[in-house]
Image (cartoon, grey):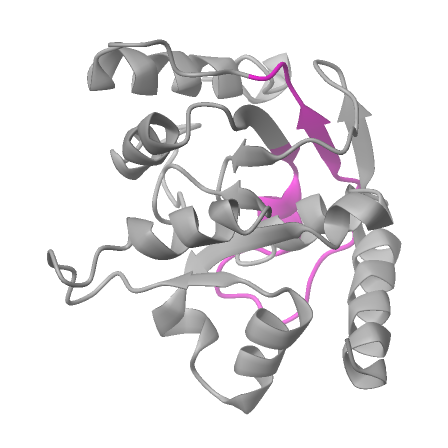
Amino acid sequence: MSITVRITASALAGAARLLTGVRPNWVGCLPEPRQRIYLANHTSHGDFVLIWTVLPQALRARTRPVAAAEYWSRGKLRRFVGQDVFKAVLIAREGVNRSNDPRAPLLAALDAGNSLILFPEGTRNTTDAKLLPFKSGLFHVARARPDVELVPVWIDNLSRVMPKGELLPIPLLCNVTFGAPLQISPQEPKTVFLERARQALMSLAPRSSES
């Protein structure tokens, strides 16, 4: 890792803590050196930054966010931050076909020993619903790598810190809550698994924010 990348990573983590006062709540597991897929709600482009920021340094170095290639490949600065600083696994959401399987880079990252930060809704939630339905990709990745822990993570308040359409963030306290790990059961149907994972994530939402 170059000194420029290290300085940028430290600066971004420091800015996130200063702006949001972000605090990790490990209510269902501990920050242990296990390979995991962190499943989080998605309301802002800054979501993965908060999760990455609150992880201990040893875990942060082996944890890669999954992000849209169309967004993080646009412009030199975004490419530098996404690919060099965060080492994001970039997924194309356009032109997907059998020869361009978006699951392939996720499985390659897991096989290399990395953990992932994944947003199973598939896109930012700009609706009044607390969670959108989960995309099937989570099921297929979990089925392909069943030994990897799936940890639900609820990010609270970031959508108000960085509201859509605003140029400047609004300082507010944010919490990142880590729940109990899940694992897919043998022969578990896709719809059953996805709803179980969704409910596990929803259960971490503060009562005041639930619909």
| Residue 43 appears anywhere in the view | no
Residue sitting at x 57%, y 71%? 82
Residue sitting at x 57%, y 35%? 38
Q: Is residue 43 magenta?
A: no
Where is residue 180, by image quadrant? top right
Left or right position of 89 against 53: left
Compared to residue 71, the image places residue 55 above or below, namely above
Left or right position of 129 against 190: right
Residue sitting at x 77%, y 22%? 26
Residue sitting at x 26%, y 61%? 93
Judge by depth and name the residue closer to the eye, 144 or 72. Answer: 144
Q: Is residue 171 magenta?
A: yes
Image location (x, y in percent) of residue 63: 65, 49
Q: Give the range drawn in magenta.
A: 155-181
Left or right position of 206 against 22: left
Image location (x, y in percent) of residue 34: 69, 31
Marks counted in the figure total: 0
Compared to residue 199, the image places residue 133 above or below, namely below
Judge by depth and name the residue closer to the eye, 79 or 189. Answer: 189
Where is residue 73, by image quadrant? bottom left
Image location (x, y in percent) of residue 175: 74, 33
Image location (x, y in percent) of residue 72: 47, 72
Where is residue 69, by image quadrant? bottom left
Q: In which quadrant is the C terminus drawn?
A: top left
| Residue 120 appears anywhere in the view | yes
